């Protein structure tokens, strides 16, 4: 009689025909753990699951969060999302960052940790997209308004704009579901294609931020009818 498999470990066949062990287990007072062990060796997978369960116990009982390096976190992310569309782009970005911060602990990483990476990219003549966009916006600001933009404007990031958009949607009373759709959050819903009525609803929801007292009077999206074209 063969050895029983540790509860929570399952074989998962990969696209290349080989398999690896996957974790799918519910843990009391924590929830569901669903991730790849990244190996086809049962003993190694069992050891991985045992370590993950101990990490969860430490976190839930004692509030201790495991210390992980950037490389470990990146590897786990790529394993867990390997079937996600566009994951190859994420893998390239993480690979480029690894020589600079791969050994750093996650809780030790800050904005300055990326300086060497930015300098190296600049020397190679590679422009970081959002930096180039920010520089263009600064030039346009000065051209159209005739004055230097505030320092805050010169440091703004695309993520800052996204965060502000989400905050103003919430302040305007837009529902959580519509906010998730407008911000592109993964909400676990099956539907990814919208009907004309649903699109119009999202446009209306986006325009609600013009009514928010925190936001300037600016139309974010405007639906142009066929007659107006």
Image (cartoon, grey):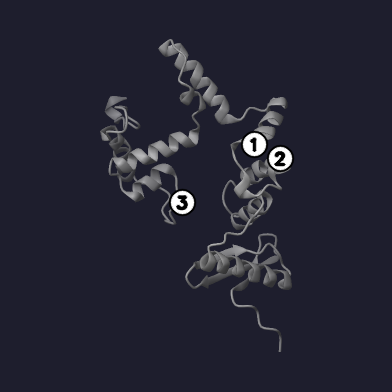
Callout 3 crowding tier (Cα within 10 Å): few <14, some 14–19, many ≥20:
few
Label 1 sits on residue: 114
Does residue 69 appear to the left or right of 228 in the view shown? right
Residue closest to the eye, 125 or 171: 171
Q: Which of marks 3 and 1 is nearer the N terminus?
A: 1
Question: Which circle marks residue 186 in the picture?
Answer: 3
- The quadrant of the rendering that contains the C terminus is top left
- The quadrant of the rendering that contains the N terminus is bottom right
Does residue 189 appear to the left or right of 34 in the view shown? left
Callout 2 crowding tier (Cα within 10 Å): few <14, some 14–19, many ≥20:
some
Residue closest to the eye, 7 or 152: 152
Q: Where is residue 111 in the image (x, y as percent from the top left)?
A: 59, 37
Label 2 sits on residue: 100
Position of residue 196 relative to residue 59, above or below, is above
Q: Nearer the viewer, mark 2 or mark 3?
A: 2
CA distance for labels 3 and 1: 27 Å
CA distance for labels 2 and 1: 8 Å
Could you tell me which secondary element the residue under label 1 belongs to? Answer: helix
Could you tell me which secondary element the residue under label 2 belongs to? Answer: helix
């Amino acid at each position: 009689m063969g050895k029983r498999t540790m509860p929570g470990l399952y074989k998962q066949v990969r696209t290349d025909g080989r398999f690896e062990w996957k974790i799918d287990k519910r843990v009391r007072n924590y929830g569901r753990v669903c991730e790849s062990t990244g190996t086809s060796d049962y003993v190694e997978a069992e050891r991985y699951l045992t370590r993950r369960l101990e990490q969860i116990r430490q976190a839930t009982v004692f509030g201790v969060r495991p210390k992980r390096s950037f490389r470990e976190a990146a590897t786990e992310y790529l394993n867990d999302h390997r079937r996600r569309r566009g994951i190859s782009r994420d893998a390239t970005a993480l690979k480029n960052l690894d020589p600079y911060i791969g050994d750093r602990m996650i809780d030790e990483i800050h904005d300055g940790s990326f300086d060497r990476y930015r300098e190296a990219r600049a020397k190679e003549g590679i422009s970081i997209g959002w930096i180039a966009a920010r520089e263009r916006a600064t030039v346009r600001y000065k051209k159209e308004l005739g004055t230097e933009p505030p320092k805050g404007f010169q440091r703004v990031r695309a993520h800052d704009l996204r965060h502000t958009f989400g905050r103003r949607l919430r302040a305007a009373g837009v529902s959580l579901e519509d906010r998730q759709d407008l911000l592109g959050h993964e909400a676990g819903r099956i539907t990814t294609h919208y009907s004309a009525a649903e699109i119009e609803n999202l446009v209306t929801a986006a325009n609600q931020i013009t009514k928010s007292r925190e936001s300037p009077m600016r139309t974010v999206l405007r639906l142009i009818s066929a007659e107006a074209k």
